[in-house]
Image (cartoon, helix red, strand yellow):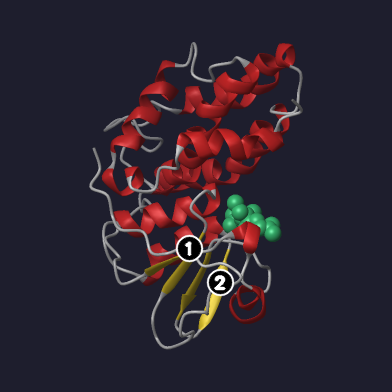
Amino acid sequence: MAAVDAIPPVLNSKSEPPPLFDGTTRLYINLACPYAQRVWAARNYKGLTDIQIVPIDLLDRPTWYKEKVYPPNKVPSLEHDGKVTGESLDLLTYLETNFGGPKLLPTDTVKKEAAEELLKYTDTFTTAGFSTLKKPQAEVPEALAPTLDHLENVLGKFDGGPFFLGEFSSVDLAYAPFFERFQIVYPIYKNYDITIGRPKLLKWIQEVQKIDAYAKTIADPEEVAVLYKRFTAN
Ligand SMILES: N[C@@H](CCC(=O)N[C@@H](CS)C(=O)NCC(=O)O)C(=O)O
């Protein structure tokens, strides 16, 4: 079981902004957002506790977030060195380049190429995952098979562990929050287990969720189920 870190209060439309651009590094997230979770878990893994976590209520968003922090009005975003940047995959690289702690991206050429390809492929995977939630149940296994089978085959390509590159990396963090959610919602809304016949994926999900830095970011499964109902056609 992961030690539970105290999560700061969620800021909403009634909340005052933090003292912006005072030199503090802040990671703005939403507790249910899989994109933000990627970066939050990377921050934990690297032990970057100086990066303050600022959870935002996206359904009752503070106006200052868009006006003063991050005009695209999405999470995650990172306030660092007098500027704010976003996009979860870019932020994974940003953390790697600008902060210390254990590395999450490989330097080895072959693994670097594999990482780039897999990070690029996350869009294909998330698009398939979300669009298939809207399909009739009978069409689900076939619609998801190409992406899930591709990832099942990629796993195990490298020795050294159950992770995409062998060792744990940003690639795992890029996929894990979405698998976490799809593994909850597909059985409920589509009577389909995404890991059936895919033992490497199942093992991978279990192993990622054991990593303390990630475990501390796992969403409440009941909240995920309720939230994702709107992505289904049910
Ligand atoms: N491409 C962005 C996507 C971020 C994103 O869509 N975040 C959602 C929450 S999970 C959001 O902020 N939605 C608010 C909105 O679109 O207004 C990333 O990778 O960071």
State the image coordinates of residue 58 (x, y, percent, origin top left): 61, 59
Q: Residues under labels 2 and 1: Cα distance?
A: 20 Å
Q: Which residue is mark 2?
A: 85
Kind of element beneath mark 2: strand
Left or right: where 42 falls relative to 46: right
Asked whether the beta carbons under mark 2 and mark 1 sit within 8 Å of each other, the answer is no
| Rendering quarter of residue 158 | top left
When the figure is inspected, residue 26 is found, relative to residue 231, above or below; the finding is below
The residue located at (63%, 62%) in the rendering is 60
| Rendering quarter of residue 66 | bottom right
Foreground pick, 50 / 7: 7
Near mark 1 (Cα within 10 A), the count class, few <14, some 14-19 or many ≥20, is: some
State the image coordinates of residue 168 (x, y, percent, origin top left): 33, 42
When the figure is inspected, residue 211 is found, relative to residue 50, above or below; the finding is above
When the figure is inspected, residue 46 is found, relative to residue 217, above or below; the finding is below
Compare marks 2 and 1 and give the one earlier in the sequence.
1
